[in-house]
Image (cartoon, rainbow, N blue to C red):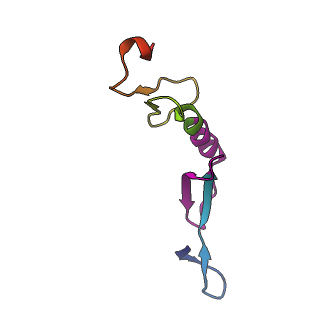
């Protein structure tokens, strides 16, 4: 993918920066695409990996700005007993 706004000295568009997280099952877990002019945020990449690993086998979701140790969102289908 090319960044239409960022060009080199010859006017050729620069490529976007992309991160692809592939799980042990060879499936894409998440991808993040940044403009060529924006650096990657490794803390966000690690946070996303932590979330994918945490939610893999549990009926939960991680909310915005979640970090390991924070509260999670429990699926409504889960009983109160199982949620605890």
Residue range corresponding to the magenta coloring? 22-50
Q: Which image quadrant is residue 54 in?
A: top right
Indicate whether 30 appears above or below 5. above
Q: Residue at x 59, y 39 (%)?
A: 47
Quarter the N terminus occupies:
bottom right
Closest to the observer, 61 or 64: 61
Closest to the observer, 6 or 44: 44
Quarter the C terminus occupies:
top left
Residue 19: give x, y in percent of width and height.
62, 57
Closest to the observer, 22 or 67: 22
Q: Is residue 6 left or right of residue 64?
A: right
Is 49 included in the stretch rendered in magenta?
A: yes
Residue 63: give x, y in percent of width and height.
44, 34
Indicate whether 26 appears above or below 9. above
Q: Is residue 9 left or right of residue 60?
A: right
As drawn, the residue found furthest toward the left would be: 76
Residue 42: give x, y in percent of width and height.
66, 47
As drawn, the residue found furthest toward the front would be: 25
Q: Residue at x 52, y 33 (%)?
A: 55
């Amino acid at each position: 993918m090319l960044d239409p706004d960022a060009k080199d000295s010859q006017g050729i568009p620069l490529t976007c920066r992309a991160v692809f997280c592939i799980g042990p099952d060879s499936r894409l877990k998440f991808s993040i695409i940044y403009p060529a002019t924006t650096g990657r945020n490794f803390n966000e990449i690690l946070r996303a990996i932590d979330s994918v690993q945490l939610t893999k086998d549990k009926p939960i979701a991680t909310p915005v700005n979640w970090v390991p140790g924070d509260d999670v969102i429990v699926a409504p289908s889960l009983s109160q007993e199982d949620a605890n």
